[in-house]
Image (cartoon, rainbow, N blue to C red):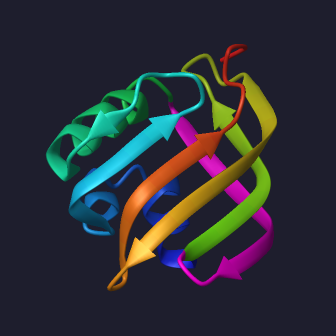
Amino acid sequence: MKNLFQAIDNKDTETFAGFLSEHAIFRFGNAPLVEGRANIAAVVDGFFNSIKSLSHSVTETWRTPTGVICQGTVTYTRFDDSTLTIPFCNIFKVNENLIEEYLIFADVSAL
């Protein structure tokens, strides 16, 4: 998970996408569900381009038989250099070391 969050914090869409299975599903907050690695990468890249930077602080991680749950805070930096720090919880379903389902629970409405 550390390498995944590092790719995200680096706004590295290509490395991020490498963690996903070809037919992964992804949901960020209350946004519509996105299916497929290429579609997810496009959505995430669009989000990366909408902010100046981001930084995750993962405070707890739990492993389950089928995946991982992480919680912590994320700080977004806008292009005007103002910041927003919010809590998040992510649920990952993993198969053969690739993410098949990636659910982000965070309220980014203030962003």
Residue 73 x %, y %: 79, 49
- Front-most of residues 25 and 4: 25
Q: Residue at x 60, y 30 (%)?
A: 29
Residue 96 x %, y %: 32, 85
Q: Residue at x 61, y 72 (%)?
A: 68
Instruction: Say how many tags the image has.
Output: 0
Above/below status of 101 relative to 41: below
Q: For this view, does 94 lie left or right of residue 64?
A: left
- Front-most of residues 83 and 57: 57
Residue 49 x %, y %: 36, 29
Q: Residue at x 71, y 64 (%)?
A: 70
56 falls in the magenta region: yes
| Magenta highlight range | 52-66
15 falls in the magenta region: no
Image quarter in which the N terminus is found: bottom right
Residue occupying the far front of the picture: 65
Above/below status of 22 relative to 98: above
Q: For this view, does 2 lie left or right of residue 32?
A: right
Dominant secondary structure (helix, strand or loop) of the stretch shown in magenta: strand
Q: For this view, does 11 lie left or right of residue 30?
A: left
Above/below status of 60 relative to 103: below
Q: Residue at x 21, y 51 (%)?
A: 37
Image quarter in which the C terminus is found: top right
Residue 6 x %, y %: 51, 66
